[in-house]
Image (cartoon, helix red, strand yellow):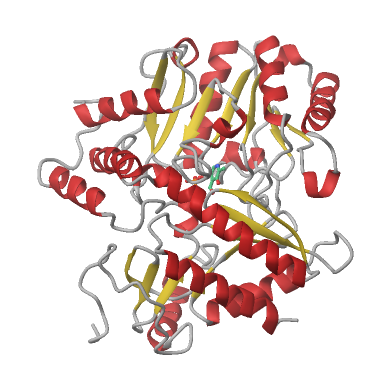
């Protein structure tokens, strides 16, 4: 361990960008060689700096570099890495017991978290929750519940959707490379409808929903549909915010046709967009909400929360898994909820949105390669195009991301066409680091002209 290494992470880490070596530095490169020899090639890395500590708005690597975090480990550490209440709660739980399996001998933390999720998710109807480990596992379980409740099989998903990498969720995910290529055959009874993508289709929300529903009615038949599953703002697909009225029109159609409306809030949930759940921005009340990522501050946990009569349709023993609702993860999630409430993080996400949209819109006015600036809360993106067109420019996108990485700012790309730069800062990031991160990004656009 070098003299540059902090012994703990969390918000107490110096909140500064420090570059001691090139990025990645020599120790990270050594580890990358060991990774190549030991880890399956299919597990890729975006920015191969090897981490020793993280907290607030920084990630510190083995070479002593301190990078500005605009990724939150893909929208997970919303309350910050090693957030104090999470550390305290998990330590407390760790000293008592680490696992019993809720399906064998249960514990209160699981029940408390279910109660909290039933309260926090949109709608005042009676609800039930079941806990799992990953986003994909929770999406699968939402589909299981919808099928057993309706006695139907078809699942409707959308263009640009991302729902995970398990067999069913690969079928539900739109993009072939890298998520699906060569991994078939995929699960059946999954049907894809066009999304609302205002930058590309120019349609209003109601009109886009009617286009999608007419295809569903003609090609699938409403009476065969168990569930419509949608991300209220698409994540991996390009941070696409549907036009106003799109989600509401879909939800209404579901209600009228006995179809379960499932909001996949894995990426958008838990304060990320400035509301506890992104559906709230549109006053949409889903039948089932799927949470993961930001839910447990970095511990693996996911949840399916829905109307009691839908969730209770599954027979006793039909839902579960060895680790689902692990006690450490439940204690972390309860501490995350407390942190969001006590630290006013919904307002913090709204303030981050204001700063980022202002700065990026200004950048767009000066740079014709930025076709669109969009997003909500601390989930903001720019879509990069060839000037004067809406033709995607994934090459420039990759060059801008690489330039930001070299300067010690973690940014991610996404989008069906690979031409979207997305920003997911932890809500614990201090203003001066957010400002510096944006300055580096502006410099990265300038350097790649
Ligand atoms: C909207 C959405 N659903 C599902 C998933 C899958 O979650 P996990 O990677 O935890 O399986 C993700 C992951 O990025 C996601 O963004």
Q: Residue furthest right?
A: 388
Quadrant of image for the C terminus:
bottom right
Judging depth in this view, the residue of 376 and 291 nearest the camera is 376
* Residue 257 visible in this rendered orientation of the protein: no
- Residue at (56% x, 77% y) in the render: 440
Please indicate whether residue 169 sits to the left or right of residue 447 in the image: left
Please indicate whether residue 290 sits to the left or right of residue 82 in the image: right
Question: Where in the figure is residue 46, as x and y percent of width and height?
Answer: 54, 68
In the displayed structure, 140 sits above or below 9; it is above
In the displayed structure, 109 sits above or below 388; it is above
Question: Where in the figure is residue 224, as x and y percent of width and height?
Answer: 72, 15
Quadrant in the rendering for residue 421: bottom right
* Residue 172 visible in this rendered orientation of the protein: yes
- Residue at (48% x, 49% y) in the render: 349
Q: Residue furthest left?
A: 96
Counting the numbered discs, the total is 0
Please indicate whether residue 44 sits to the left or right of residue 390 in the image: left
- Residue at (81% x, 32% y) in the render: 208
Quadrant of image for the N terminus:
bottom left
- Residue at (38% x, 81% y) in the render: 65
Judging depth in this view, the residue of 79 and 398 nearest the camera is 79
In the displayed structure, 148 sits above or below 396; it is above
Please indicate whether residue 226 sits to the left or right of residue 411 in the image: right
Question: Where in the figure is residue 67, as x and y percent of width and height?
Answer: 43, 75
Question: Where in the figure is residue 268, as x and y percent of width and height?
Answer: 53, 42
In the displayed structure, 215 sits above or below 389; it is above
Judging depth in this view, the residue of 299 and 179 nearest the camera is 299
């Amino acid at each position: 361990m070098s003299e540059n290494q902090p012994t703990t992470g969390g918000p107490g880490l110096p909140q500064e960008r420090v570059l001691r070596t090139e990025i990645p530095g020599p120790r990270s490169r050594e580890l990358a060689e060991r990774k190549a020899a030991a880890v399956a090639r299919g597990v890729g890395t975006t920015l191969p700096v090897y981490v020793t500590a993280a907290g607030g708005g920084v990630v510190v690597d083995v070479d002593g570099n301190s990078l500005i975090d605009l990724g939150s480990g893909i929208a997970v550490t919303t309350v910050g890495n090693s957030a104090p209440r999470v550390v305290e709660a998990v330590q407390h739980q760790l000293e008592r017991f680490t696992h019993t399996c809720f399906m064998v001998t249960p514990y209160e933390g699981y029940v408390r978290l279910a109660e909290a999720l039933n309260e926090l998710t949109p709608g005042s109807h009676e609800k039930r929750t079941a806990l799992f480990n990953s986003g994909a596992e929770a999406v699968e379980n939402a589909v299981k519940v919808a099928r057993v409740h309706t006695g139907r099989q078809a699942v409707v998903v959308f263009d640009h959707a991302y729902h995970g990498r398990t067999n069913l969720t690969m079928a539900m995910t739109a993009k072939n490379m890298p998520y699906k290529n060569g991994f078939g055959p995929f699960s059946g009874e999954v049907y894809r409808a066009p999304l609302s993508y205002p930058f590309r289709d120019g349609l209003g929300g109601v009109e886009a929903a009617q286009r999608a529903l007419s295809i569903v009615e003609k090609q699938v038949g409403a009476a065969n549909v168990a569930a419509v599953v949608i991300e209220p703002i698409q994540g991996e697909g390009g941070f696409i915010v549907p036009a106003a009225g799109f989600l509401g029109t879909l939800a209404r159609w579901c209600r009228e046709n006995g179809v379960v409306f499932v909001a996949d809030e894995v990426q958008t949930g838990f304060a990320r967009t400035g509301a506890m759940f992104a559906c709230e921005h549109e006053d949409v009340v889903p039948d089932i909400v799927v949470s993961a990522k930001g839910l447990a501050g970095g511990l693996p946990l996911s949840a399916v929360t829905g109307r009691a009569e839908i969730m209770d349709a599954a027979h006793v023993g039909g839902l579960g898994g060895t680790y689902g609702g692990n006690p450490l993860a439940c204690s972390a999630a309860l501490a995350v909820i407390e942190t969001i409430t006590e630290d006013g993080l919904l307002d913090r996400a709204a303030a981050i949105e204001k700063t980022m949209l202002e700065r990026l819109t200004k950048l767009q006015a000066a740079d014709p390669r930025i076709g669109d600036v969009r997003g909500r809360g601390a989930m903001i993106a720019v879509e990069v195009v060839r000037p004067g067109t809406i033709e995607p420019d994934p090459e420039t996108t990759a060059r801008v991301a690489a330039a930001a990485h070299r300067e010690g700012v973690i940014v991610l790309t996404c989008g069906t066409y690979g031409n979207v730069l997305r920003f997911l800062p932890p809500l614990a990031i201090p203003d001066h680091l957010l400002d510096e991160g944006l300055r580096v990004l502006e410099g990265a656009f300038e350097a790649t002209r």
